Image (cartoon, grey):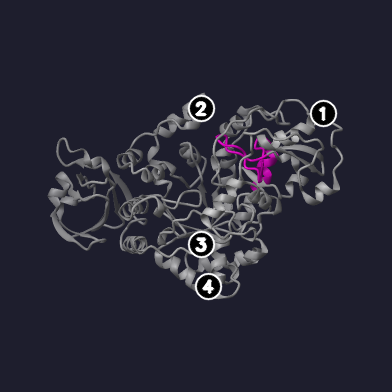
Amino acid sequence: MPHPLLYEINTRCWLRDLSQKNSAPVTLANVPDSEFATWKHLGFTHIWLMGVWRSGLLARAEALRFPGQRQAYSDALPDWTQSDVEGSPYAIADYRVPANLGGDESLAAFRRKLNAHGLKLILDFVPNHLGLDHPWINQFPDLFVQAPIASGVGSSPSPEGEAQGTAVALSNVPEIPSGSSPSPPSAAPERSGGGLEERVGERKPFSREHLNSMEAKSQAEGSFLRQTHHGLRLLAHGKDPNFPAWTDTIQLDYRRPETHAKMLEVLHTIANRCDGVRCDMAMLILPEVFTQTWSWFPVSINHPPSTINSFWPHTISSIKSLHPSFLFLAEAYWRLETELQAQGFDFTYDKELYDRLVARDAAGVQRHLFSLPSPSPFEVATASPLLEERAGERSSSSASVVFRGAHFLENHDERRIASVLSAAEHRAAALVILGLPGMRFLHEGQLTGACRRLPVQLTRRCVEPPLPEVAQIYDQLLAAIQLTSIGRGRAELLKPRPAWTENPTAENFILIQWQSEPGSFDLVAVNLASHQGQCYAPLTIANLSTHDWRIRDLLTQNHFTRPGPDLQSQGLYLDLPANSACIFHFAH
């Protein structure tokens, strides 16, 4: 399926809402038929159940620990209580479905029913890290980024530490310095920048005299002490190099071949239960990114960075050898999208398009779709010759970023788009993401104008009455698209031509031509500017000049006729008001 239409659902909240609506417990095993019928009616091809895997008590404790995080809960759900909070779905304790969602068998039943309706199931895969509650911390501590501890120091496992799974409490722990507080849990809105005051990961073992002060310091700087079956370890929390660590997670070490092998095993088990995965922060484990991020933490194998293989090419090939149509979607930033596509990903987040749409940068949207990308912030920061070479490779294939991009206006990490754009702006931006080739990506609540961004740790959400003007936008767009070749035919981005000299408004237009069969085609035309604009659409349909064409705007039902020779020689003239969105269907 070359151009999927994906719908992201917050599984925990959705099932809770359904249970309340039906006055009976609803799990994945007994989702009402009306849900599947609605998704099919709207034209969705893939359903992403966000947050189906088990979290744990330690991750939940972290979710409740930070004042800023608690304020985020209050902003989203003013009457929240601790019973409404679970660990982050991205601090995974086990890739199994918890009992309150119905267990693993319920997921299998849900997938069978989904597939029977012609829809596919997408689930989360978090390659960079695991949650604090994951059993591998005790069983296989060598799989994680860590600093060595001197032999004989804390070498005997603590039964209490094993049973409770908590970080080791050392006596005489000094107060954490002010200004060095750790980052909130994974996927929290407080993920803001901040440097480390000191590096904990010295390249020599730590002795007992270091440990008392290290307990507090490591918590402040992104690592923690944990007693495992193999002794005391100083382990790193998962992190993005531009932000403090996620304190509800533990960082997997992709410098170790054993880590690659174990995570491939995990992914094979997931692939047996769904039709695709959304890979969280997929770029973090690219060798050049990972090596740069963790260069200051030692590794206990003698592999120099240049010999570390990327996890993705072999992994994706291995999965697709057994599941040829399995879909890989990468959450990706820093303009490393083409790199991940080259390593096998079917689609990658198009975050730059999102940023320009919410910034109301109409001309910037067009430049993004047509221009060569500039170096990413990560490339600029690292100044790596390898990355400079790959940036040049990406520049020559920028079109693939669009055609294999996942285009969105919101998701669980971003603000609700109805709280950002006016209804007219929203309508125009929505047609851009739905009209582009690649993956079209919508979010639960987006279709009804929800305005409250929900932290992923909350299992209950406010009831937000639908905004009629937003609901009408998506009802109309999704219905009209199903009458066209959009998402099913051959797509081509058209560069608008100025309507006349010294008229710059063509730079604010987005034009996408779609055709699935001879004799008809469709044109998506959007004026993203806050003022009227004019341009010519240079149509490229074969045999365009041999017919007169009947043209109908499927969103307004306005219709007109244009001679084929005129369309061939100069294109379709457009004069559109501010924030106009049109789907023109051409037939002869």
For the residues marked 1 and 2, what is the alpha-carbon distance in whole angstroms? 36 Å
First reached walking from the N terminus: tag 3 or tag 1: 1
Q: Tell me residue 207's x, y (percent).
A: 81, 28
Identify the mark at residue 21; answer none if there is no mark. 4
For the residues marked 3 and 1, what is the alpha-carbon distance in whole angstroms? 50 Å
First reached walking from the N terminus: tag 1 or tag 2: 1
Q: Hey, what amino acid is under mark 2?
A: Ala
Identify the mark at residue 209; answer none if there is no mark. 1
Specify whether 365 is left or right of 340: left
Q: Quadrant of the N terminus?
A: bottom left
- Residue that mark 2 sits on: 381
Among the 4 quarters of the image, the one containing residue 18: bottom right
Mark 3 secondary-structure assignment = loop
Q: Hey, what amino acid is under mark 1?
A: Glu
Specify whether 504 is left or right of 158: left
- Residue that mark 3 sits on: 462
Query: Would residue 324 be seen by someone viewing this image from the given angle?
Result: no
Most extreme residue toward the bottom is: 23
Location of residue 152 with respect to 424 vertically, above or below:
above
Q: Hey, what amino acid is under mark 3?
A: Cys
For the residues marked 4 and 2, what is the alpha-carbon distance in whole angstroms? 51 Å
